Amino acid sequence: MIDVSDFLASNPVRINLAHKAPVVPTKAETTGEGEGDNSCFDGGSESSKSKQSSEQEAYLHKGSYGHLPVDNGTNDKRYGKRRYKRTPKKGGFGSRNHRTGDSGLIDPYDEQSCKEAGLTLLDAAARPRQALAERLQAKGYAPAVVERVLVRLEELGFIDDQAYAQSYLRYCLSRNLGESGVFREMKRKGVEASTAERVIASAVNEGLFVESAYELGRKVAKKTMGLDENVRRRRLWSAGVRKGHSPALIKQVAADLFPWASSD
């Protein structure tokens, strides 16, 4: 007769740990030994019970991928799903307030690690100087170290607030924003007020906000076609104010696109 342990070793089976472990017959029960005594009725001797328990444990933790470690609380694994805790890379995303290898918590004065974290953030998306400083300080780096890293990144050309503001201005104009709307969005992104004002003043001289306001007016006129003129004007004023255009410019666009009737 085939031995049970040999059968299990040659035919591994994955078992859901949520189910109750099956009862594995012992060698004595499969071969028929000990049928003359009362061990089959009283549960068997202590040695047979311990042997059966060890066989059940081996059968339970043996799957198609070999022996699985017994879950003693050290590894976070439930019902066959491997959920190991990830150790974040030092200086990378998610490293704040976490342990990073043998060094424990990140060193707030590690300039090289701070530089790597800054390059990682810049690789994900372009950022102004102030926004990058806030992110690095939020990771736990000292302000003095962050300042030295930012100066070095500026020297290398990785940080350019002027270029970032000009690029973001084009994005805001594509959304038909006005002067105050662009300034508000740049401040939210972390652009310094002096840089934002300088870029906005250049756009005003080029007439970019006038074009943006008329483009917004044409969109409102298309959406409100067939409505009353007063309703169309109110829609234009509402949209213009939300976008941050000046009242004088909105009034000019409304007069050109929604002229009053001759009877008025």
Image (cartoon, grey):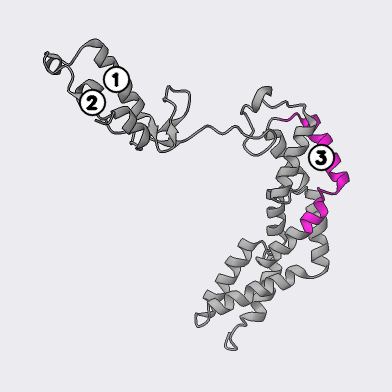
Classify 244 as above or below 117: below
As drawn, the residue found furthest toward the top would be 46
- Secondary element at tag 1: helix
Upstream in sequence: badge 2 or badge 3: 2
Of circles 1 and 3, the one toward us is: 1
Of circles 1 and 2, the one toward us is: 2
In the rendering, which numbered label is found on residue 53? 1
Q: Main secondary structure of the magenta part?
A: helix
Task: State which region is magenta.
Answer: 141-166
Would you call the spot at circle 3 few (<14 residues within 10 Å), some (14-19), or many (20 or more)? many
Upstream in sequence: badge 1 or badge 3: 1
Q: Position of residue 244 (x, y in %)?
A: 66, 61
Answer with left or right where residue 221 lies relative to residue 69. Answer: right
Can residue 133 be seen at all in this image of the molecule? no
As drawn, the residue found furthest toward the right would be 155
User: The disc labelled 1 sits on which kind of residue?
Assistant: Ser
